[in-house]
Amino acid sequence: MNCFCCFHKDDLNMKKQSGGNDGKRTAQQAAQDVKVHSCRSWHQRVSIVAGAARGLEYLHEKANPHIVHRDIKSSNILIFGDGVAKIAEFDLSNESDMAARLHSSRILGTFSYHAPDEYAMTGQLSAKSDVYSFGVVLLELLTGRKPVDHTLPRGKQSLVTWCVDSGLGGDYPPEAVAKFAVVAALCVQYEDSFRPNMRTVVNAFQSFVESATATAAATPTKRTNYLFTPHAKAVAGICTVIQTNTSLCCKTLKHVPTNDPIELIRALAVAAESSVKNSVAFLSEIKPKHTSNATAAAAISSCEKNLKYALEDFTEFWKATGKDVKTLAHNYFTCKKTLMSIMGYHWTCLDDIEDKSLLKEMEIGIGVGKNLSSDSYDVFNGLNTIFKTFGIKVKLNEEDTSPRPPPLSAYYY
């Protein structure tokens, strides 16, 4: 059997009905196949969740009397052999218990699916409580994660923050995913008055089903979403340690044809050095048009001199990094110190320029080299984190290994 989506396989529990299998299973039971079967497509996922939404809408707005389910979760969604999904009660065998539960104010259900405010209260739960729980199921469907995963770092354990399930492999319409996420986000609003009713949710998913059906009927074209590739993950593992904007780092490394983190780190420094060379060339080009302004000409010449010093530092940097990761790790402090010096030369370029027009011109002209040099420093400064991310078990030497000048006594007889 195929799986509903990459749901977790913990706490699988479903009351089996008599009268044959009939292809019935739960979303969580379907997750048992995740290791040996591919997950359902975007079209199938949307169709399943639309069916579940219609079932919950019936309970809330069409059943007489209206019913609050109070235990909506992925294991209470039955998936039939033809892909049809229906809302189920956790235990369908005891009708008297069912009636008592539906009219009780006692908190039931599963903690990880409860809205935080309702769970803390002891009053009557509402249809909007079901909507919140259904929103958590939507996030499970979108991400392939548990509602709460205590194995993750603190702050990432709750599913309220999510990203699209990589099991889809990029084979989905981005616009539809964005709308799907909006519906899920509305369902899990903290204030119940901000959550939509199930009729609104059903209408939204009906449009998703129609769109997905039309897309599935067309000749499929295989698309690969770069964000889910090993290369993108490798680049992210490098660039996320940067303290400010990571976009220049990601853009620079995106086209470097390797997933090796050490080679990516080197490539970023190569790009920084190349950009500094371009900065020196830029300063040489603009110098003639500022010869009439002695102050501007002096500032440009001073900056040009500083950036040439920075290029000399790059030569020392490459000597320190060596050809392998052990050499780089041994000279780690020296590499970091040299990159800090390169950054300093860039800042010195701009410190004493009072002419705003000239300052803007030079910031643009040397900006890429300055920013890439800063990014390279941040990467080396966060090298411990990067090594942990990629499982590189090499200790970084925090002692200065740069050549020391001879003692003063060497200059005297």
Image (cartoon, rainbow, N blue to C red):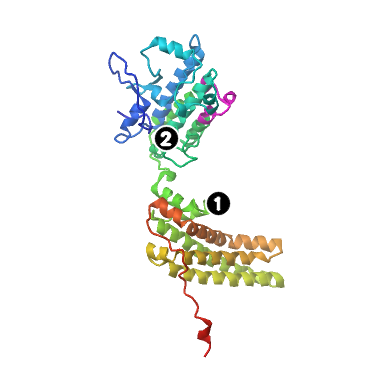
Residue 401 is situated, as x and y percent measured from the top left of the image, at: 45, 70
Q: Is residue 71 magenta?
A: no
Identity, as a three-letter code, of the amino acid under mark 1: Asn
Q: Residue furthest bottom?
A: 413
Q: Which residue is mark 1?
A: 245
Front residue of this view, candidates 26 and 205: 26
Residue 109 is situated, as x and y percent measured from the top left of the image, at: 45, 22
Front residue of this view, candidates 4 and 127: 127
Residue located 51% across and 62% down the image: 272
Residue 226, picture quadrant: top left
Residue located 49% across and 16% down the image: 68
Q: Residue furthest left?
A: 20
Instruction: Report the span colored magenta.
Output: 183-200
Using the image, determine if residue 72 lies above or below residue 393: above
Quote the CA–CA distance across marks 2 and 1.
28 Å
Front residue of this view, candidates 279 and 64: 64
Residue 5, picture quadrant: top left
Helix, strand or loop at mark 1: loop
